[in-house]
């Protein structure tokens, strides 16, 4: 993986290129941004570029010994630290500290990537602070976090901040069509629904998200025509979807109720968009644009806002471990009511 192969993130890439051209390169970086937009890939590209024996314009050649080792996952000086359970714990940082006592095996740079750095316990964070103050030379730390505010300010201030942005919809759509052979309309839907996260869009292609989304949206579409009894049945059907957590890191993604509610929210956002005359380029469910246009005119703006708020509240209730069946009954009946009163 070289910098040139990374989709988007021009600012991050040019910042790192500038940094690498310096005589003394900074030893700690904080990569921030949502999962799945290229933070890990960039850390890999950085490691390759720093250790490449025949770099081309500051980028890795892809063919030398260390480049090949990186590609096959056998480079000895690329280390990862991930949460064990929910947190990165102090023993993991102590272990790292011991490893840093030895010079990099390859004679070049050792790069250590901390995944979800915001999950460090305060003991772990304090221990890491000492490392950040005076790391042995030849070691580069890359902390990854969604949001810098979740980290100790003292840690943030010791790192070079490198923000990563969600990817532009058009770039992602083009990439999904070209590289993955995704149908153009579906690629546009995935680019939008994933919130500009390529990692998430790729996961969506891999599992049965595309079919599930159809099923979830069909539920909403038929909701207004259902009797109260049938609506309650549907709520039960929804509650049987596993209460999984959705997309949290670029590695874990589980399809379940949370994801369904997110898809439902995009539906109401689209209806609201159409209702207030917003452009189609902002629409998420572009493959349903005709249906959305048919429905939106009949609905009141306030009820659409209330529908979005209801879904938001349901997600919060589920996170607080409230009874899934009750939460879904309330959600489905409220949503049904908003549609009916909108007519
Ligand atoms: Zn190389």
Image (cartoon, helix red, strand yellow):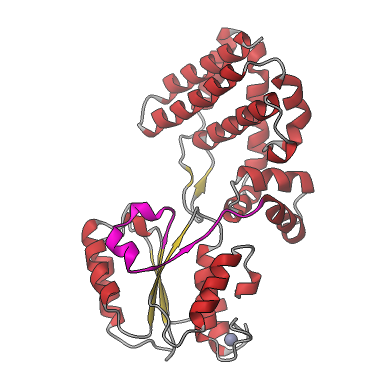
Residue 282 position, x and y percent, is: 68, 39
**Quarter-of-image position of residue 215:** top right
Q: Please give the name of the residue rendered at 57% of the width and 66% of the height, measured from the top-left corner.
A: 11
Residue 24 left/right relative to 4:
left
Give the magenta range.
Answer: 144-168
Residue 135 appears in the picture as rendered: yes
- Give the camera-side residue of 313 and 327: 313
Q: Is residue 305 left or right of residue 56?
A: left
Q: Quadrant of the C terminus?
A: top right
Relative side of 285 to 129, left or right? right
Q: In the image, residue 173 lies at what x, y percent?
A: 72, 52
Q: Residue at x 35, y 56 (%)?
A: 118
159 falls in the magenta region: yes
Q: In the rendering, at what x and y percent does residue 337 appear?
A: 56, 11
Residue 184 drawn above or below residue 239? below
Q: Position of residue 285 (x, y in %)?
A: 69, 36
Which picture quadrant has residue 31? bottom left
The residue shown at (66%, 48%) is 191
Task: Give the mark count.
Answer: 0
Regarding residue 74, the answer to whether it shows in the image is no
Is residue 318 located in the magenta-colored stretch of the structure?
no
When the figure is inspected, residue 218 is found, relative to residue 82, above or below; the finding is: above
Q: Residue at x 75, y 52 (%)?
A: 182
Residue 169 vertical placement versus 112 (above, below): above
260 displayed left or right of 111 = right
Ligand 1 quadrant assignment: bottom right
Q: Quadrant of the N terminus?
A: bottom right
Depth order, front residue of 310/260? 310
The answer to which of 244 and 23 lies nearer the viewer is 23
């Amino acid at each position: 993986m070289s910098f040139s192969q990374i989709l988007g993130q021009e600012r991050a890439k040019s910042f790192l290129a500038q940094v690498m051209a310096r005589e003394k390169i900074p030893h700690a970086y904080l990569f921030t941004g949502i999962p799945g937009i290229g933070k890990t890939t960039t850390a890999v590209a950085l490691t390759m570029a720093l250790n490449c024996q025949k770099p081309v314009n500051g980028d890795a050649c892809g063919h030398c010994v260390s480049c090949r080792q990186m590609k096959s996952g056998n480079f000895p000086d690329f280390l990862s630290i991930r949460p064990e359970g929910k947190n990165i714990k102090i023993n993991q940082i102590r272990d790292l500290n011991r490893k840093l006592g030895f010079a990099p095996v390859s004679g070049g740079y050792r790069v250590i990537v901390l995944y979800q750095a915001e999950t460090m316990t305060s003991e772990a964070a304090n221990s890491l602070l000492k490392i950040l103050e005076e790391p042995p030379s030849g070691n580069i730390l890359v902390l990854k976090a969604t949001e810098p505010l979740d980290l100790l300010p003292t840690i943030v201030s010791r790192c070079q901040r490198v923000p990563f942005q969600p990817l532009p919809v058009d770039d992602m759509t083009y990439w999904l069509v070209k590289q993955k052979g995704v149908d153009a309309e579906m690629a546009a839907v995935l680019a939008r629904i994933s919130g500009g996260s390529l990692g998430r869009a790729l996961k969506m292609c891999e599992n049965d998200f595309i079919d599930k989304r159809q099923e979830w949206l069909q539920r909403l579409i038929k909701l207004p025509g259902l009797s109260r009894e049938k609506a309650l049945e549907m709520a039960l059907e929804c509650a049987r979807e596993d209460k999984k957590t959705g997309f949290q890191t670029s590695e874990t993604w589980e399809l379940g109720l949370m994801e369904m509610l997110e898809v439902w929210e995009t539906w109401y956002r689209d209806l609201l968009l159409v209702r207030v005359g917003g452009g189609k380029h902002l629409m998420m469910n572009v493959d349903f644009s005709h249906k959305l246009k048919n429905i939106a005119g009949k609905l009141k703006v306030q009820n659409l806002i209330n529908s979005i708020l209801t879904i938001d509240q349901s997600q919060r209730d589920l996170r607080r471990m409230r009874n899934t069946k009750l939460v879904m009954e309330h959600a489905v009946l409220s949503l049904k009511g908003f549609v009916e009163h909108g007519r």
